[in-house]
């Protein structure tokens, strides 16, 4: 068997290093998240498959804690309720599992954070459209050139890689960096 890990590590390092060029976009996203939480808004998250895991990860770290013991921060993962997802999927179609929740749960002072390695998931596109209609600010963490979601969020970071694994690793780094900024800015 040929060595696998060194090539993957090299590709992951290159992908993560490329994120540094998107610092300005990251700063805008972090400022929006902090402003949302300081104003009493909540952060809503969504994604599919591995991106659903990222969405749940961000929400649970906000409600629980990341590094510092601090008061709980308001966040809801739109992927976490299986009965709700299957109800909406059954009655309206899987394309609407997130947009219906944005319609019912989001307020104008909230922030929607979408994770999508392709940027082409119909349910992510509909969630971004629903957020815009409700006046909810949005963030898209994307890959593969951004797909159809490119330009649909208020702020975005597009990971410069076409491999879903590398994209999701980069999204995890971004969400950890976001949590560090939030905890630093919100807690004394």
Image: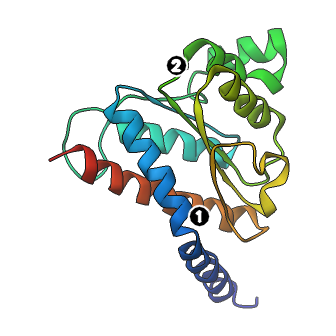
Q: On residue 169, which mark appears? A: 1
Residue 133 horizontal/vertical position (percent)? 70, 22
Mark 2 vs 1: CB contact within 8 A: no
Q: Residue at x 67, y 68 (%)?
A: 166
**Image: 92 above or below 142:** above
The quadrant the N terminus occupies is: bottom right
Q: Secondary structure at mark 2?
A: loop
Q: Secondary structure at mark 1?
A: helix
Q: CA distance from mark 2 to mark 1?
A: 30 Å
Residue 93 horizontal/vertical position (percent)? 84, 19
Is residue 98 shown to the viewer in this render?
Answer: no
Residue, disc 2: 107
Q: Residue at x 66, y 40 (%)?
A: 47
**Image: 182 above or below 10:** above
Residue 138 shown left or right of residue 90 in the figure: left
Q: Residue at x 60, y 38 (%)?
A: 138
Residue 161 shown left or right of residue 103 in the figure: right
Residue 19: which quarter of the image?
bottom right
Q: Give neighbour class at mark 2: few <14, some 14-19, many 20+ (Cα, 10 Å).
A: some
Question: Of callouts 2 and 1, which one flags the residue occurring earlier in the amino acid sequence?
Answer: 2
Residue 137: which quarter of the image?
top right
Residue 122: which quarter of the image?
top right
Residue 5 horizontal/vertical position (percent)? 63, 83
Colour treatment of the image: rainbow
Residue furthest to the left in view is 188
Is residue 85 shown to the viewer in this render?
Answer: yes
Foreground label between 2 and 1:
2
């Amino acid at each position: 068997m040929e060595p696998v890990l060194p090539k993957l590590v090299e590709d992951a390092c290159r992908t993560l290093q490329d994120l540094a060029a998107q610092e300005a976009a990251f700063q805008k996203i972090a400022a929006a998240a902090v402003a949302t939480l300081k104003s009493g808004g909540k952060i809503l998250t969504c994604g599919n498959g591995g991106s659903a895991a990222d969405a749940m990860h961000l929400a649970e770290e906000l409600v629980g804690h990341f590094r510092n013991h601090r008061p709980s921060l308001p966040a809801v993962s739109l992927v976490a309720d299986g009965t709700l997802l299957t109800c909406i999927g059954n009655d309206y179609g899987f394309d609407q599992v997130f947009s219906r929740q944005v319609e019912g749960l989001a307020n104008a002072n909230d922030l929607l954070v979408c994770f999508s390695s392709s940027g082409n998931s119909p349910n992510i596109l509909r969630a971004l459209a629903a957020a815009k209609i409700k006046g909810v600010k949005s963030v898209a963490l994307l890959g593969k050139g951004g797909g159809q979601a490119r330009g649909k969020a208020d702020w975005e970071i597009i990971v410069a890689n076409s491999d879903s694994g590398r994209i999701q690793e980069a999204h995890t780094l971004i969400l950890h960096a976001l949590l560090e900024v939030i905890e630093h800015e919100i807690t004394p």
